[in-house]
Image (cartoon, rainbow, N blue to C red):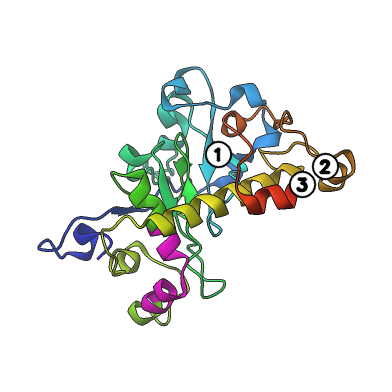
């Protein structure tokens, strides 16, 4: 099983941790799109919560790559959201599995919209929500192999056998998904190529954290490797153009 602990099969090999993240219980109060706040107030890493208010926040998933367009109020390590209580003093928010916040993982699509599990790489320094349930491993290569496997028809078929009536893909069912603890070089490269190509595609999408210029202008002006995202978002700071043949073809490089 993907996570022996959640699956309650302690005699099996430990492959990954499958977790459910932060539930704000009041998105209008605590969550914004990144362009609704000052980009200077978005933290690059956990320690910055002392003097920056907003942390990148993952909600939902898409296959291989999903742009993180939301931010959550995490000032002073989530002081306000943790203090969200009802009139009887009962905590309403659910800051669960906090030790996994800001760690790299693989999120899956919680709400069933098609037969795909839609796993995507969740970068470091992001808080994952209860609708971006996430897999964590001790190896980045293992994580990427799980993403490739999780986006396959085989994984979708196996998950359907585990929970054929699912409307939400629960942590418990995902933990039962059979998987080999094996790093596959071919799957690893496919995951990296898909991630890089989809991330580069977002450079033409204006609301994206990776935005450079509209797609039509990129085609008209021609590609230049010096082009970089103009958003100023922390998640765009490490952007580089890839060398995959498919990416070069899409950019019009001869």
Q: In what element is the residue under mark 3?
A: loop
Is label 3 or label 2 in front?
3
Q: Which residues are magenta?
A: 146-159
Name which residue lies at 61% across and 34% down: 240
Q: Which one is in front, 20 or 81? A: 20
Please tell me which of labels 2 and 1 falls first in the chain: 1
**Residue named by callout 1:** 30
In which quadrant is the N terminus drawn? Answer: bottom left
Q: Residue pushed farthest top?
A: 51
Is label 1 or label 3 in front?
3
Q: Which one is in front, 40 or 221? A: 221
Q: Residue pushed farthest right?
A: 220
- For the stretch drawn in magenta, the main secondary structure is helix
Q: In what element is the residue under mark 1?
A: helix
Q: Position of residue 20 (x, y in %)?
A: 37, 53
Instruction: Evaluate whether residue 133 shows in this view.
Output: no
Q: Judge from the rendering whether residue 23 lies leftward or rightward of residue 254; answer left or right.
A: left
Which label belongs to residue 218?
2
Name which residue lies at 63% across and 21% down: 40
Instruction: Evaluate whether residue 209 shows in this view.
Output: yes
For marks 1 and 3, give the CA distance: 47 Å
Is label 2 or label 1 in front?
2
In the displayed structure, 195 sits above or below 154; it is: above
Q: Position of residue 74 (x, y in %)?
A: 48, 31
Q: Judge from the rendering whether residue 49 lies leftward or rightward of residue 238; answer left or right.
A: left
Q: In what element is the residue under mark 2?
A: helix
Please tell me which of labels 3 and 2 falls first in the chain: 2
**Residue named by callout 3:** 254
Name which residue lies at 9% across and 63% down: 11
Dividing the picture into quadrants, the one containing residue 239 is: top right
Dividing the picture into quadrants, the one containing residue 89 is: top left
């Amino acid at each position: 099983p993907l996570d022996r602990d959640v699956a309650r099969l302690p005699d099996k090999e430990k492959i990954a941790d499958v977790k459910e993240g932060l539930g704000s219980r009041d998105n209008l109060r605590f969550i914004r799109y990144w362009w609704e706040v000052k980009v200077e107030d978005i933290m690059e890493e956990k320690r910055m919560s002392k003097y920056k208010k907003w942390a990148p926040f993952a909600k939902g998933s898409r296959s291989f790559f999903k742009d993180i367009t939301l931010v959550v109020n995490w000032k002073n390590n989530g002081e306000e959201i943790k203090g969200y209580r009802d009139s009887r003093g009962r905590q309403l928010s659910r800051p669960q599995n906090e030790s996994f916040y800001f760690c790299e993982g693989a999120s899956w699509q919680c709400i069933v919209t098609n037969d795909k599990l839609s796993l995507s790489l969740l970068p470091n320094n992001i808080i994952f929500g209860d609708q971006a349930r996430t897999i964590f491993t001790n190896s980045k290569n293992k994580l990427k192999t799980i993403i490739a496997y999780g986006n396959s028809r085989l994984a979708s078929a196996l998950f359907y056998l585990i929970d054929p009536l699912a409307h939400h893909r629960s942590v418990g069912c995902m933990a039962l998904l059979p998987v080999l603890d094996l790093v596959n070089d071919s799957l690893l490269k496919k995951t990296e190529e898909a991630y890089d190509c989809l991330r580069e595609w977002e450079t033409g999408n204006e609301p994206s954290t990776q935005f450079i210029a509209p797609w039509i202008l990129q085609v008209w002006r021609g590609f230049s490797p010096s082009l970089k995202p103009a958003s100023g978002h922390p998640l765009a700071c490490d952007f580089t153009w890839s060398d995959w043949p498919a990416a070069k073809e899409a950019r019009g490089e001869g």
